[in-house]
Image (spheres, rainbow, N blue to C red):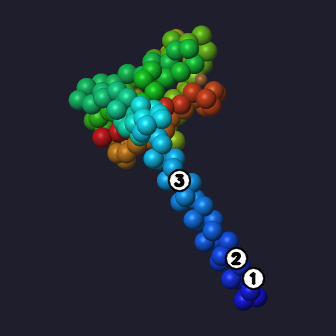
């Protein structure tokens, strides 16, 4: 029993060393080999988000995608979803607080986001799982 524990402990230690050993070269080589991509990946999500705070926000659905697919909105403002696709879609917040179905040509205005606790949520289309985005409600 004790031997097994020691062996497992040694394996664990080796595993940790291997992990940290592996990690260092990766992070060290990143800035030189692929620095731009590394920086974009680290700061991209917030930098690429469209800031729509301070006024009504609109998300347009076209080509089976949300535009923008990352946005920041004010909780006190309205959010409008416009479906420009020849297909029905939904705008569904991960929390389930918002779940709107939009038929072809539909425009849905969500009067206030005040019912949703402030935070960052993913949203998607219930019909087309690859359609997704991120919304930050402030
Ligand atoms: Cu869809």
Q: Which mark is residue 53?
A: none
Placement of the N terminus among the 4 image quadrants? bottom right
Q: Dot 3: within a 10 Å radius of its alpha carbon, few (fewer than 14), some, or many (20 or more) residues? A: few
Gap between marks 3 and 1 measured at Cα: 28 Å
Residue found at x 41% / y 31%: 36
Dot 1 corresponds to which residue?
4
Dot 2 corresponds to which residue?
8
**Residue 38 appearing in the image:** no
Q: Dot 1: within a 10 Å radius of its alpha carbon, few (fewer than 14), some, or many (20 or more) residues? A: few
Q: Secondary structure at mark 1?
A: helix
- Mark 2–mark 1 CB contact (< 8 Å): yes
Q: Secondary structure at mark 3?
A: helix
Q: Position of residue 131 (x, y in %)?
A: 57, 27
Q: Position of residue 46 (x, y in %)?
A: 36, 36
| Figure quadrant of residue 78 | top left
Q: Name the one closer to the observer, 51 or 113.
A: 51
Q: Position of residue 90 (x, y in %)?
A: 55, 27
Q: Earlier in the sequence, mark 3 or mark 1?
A: 1
Q: Nearer the viewer, mark 2 or mark 3?
A: 3
In this rendering, the answer to whether 62 lies above or below 126 is above
On the rendering, which quadrant does ligand 1 occupy?
top right
Q: Position of residue 44 (x, y in %)?
A: 40, 34
Q: Nearer the viewer, mark 3 or mark 1?
A: 3
Residue found at x 74% / y 86%: 3
Dot 3 corresponds to which residue?
23
- Mark 3–mark 1 CB contact (< 8 Å): no
């Amino acid at each position: 029993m004790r031997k097994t524990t020691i062996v497992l402990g040694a394996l664990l230690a080796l595993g940790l060393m291997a992990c940290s050993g592996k990690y260092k070269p990766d992070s060290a080589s990143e800035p030189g080999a692929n620095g731009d991509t590394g920086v974009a990946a680290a700061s991209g999500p917030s930098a690429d988000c469209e800031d729509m705070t301070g006024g009504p926000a609109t998300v347009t659905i076209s080509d089976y995608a949300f535009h923008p697919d990352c946005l920041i909105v004010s909780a006190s403002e309205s959010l409008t979803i416009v479906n420009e696709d020849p297909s029905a879609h939904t705008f569904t917040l991960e929390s389930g607080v918002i779940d709107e179905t939009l038929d072809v040509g539909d425009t849905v205005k969500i009067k206030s986001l005040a019912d949703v606790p402030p935070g960052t949520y993913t949203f998607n289309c219930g019909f087309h799982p690859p359609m997704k985005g991120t919304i930050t409600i402030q």
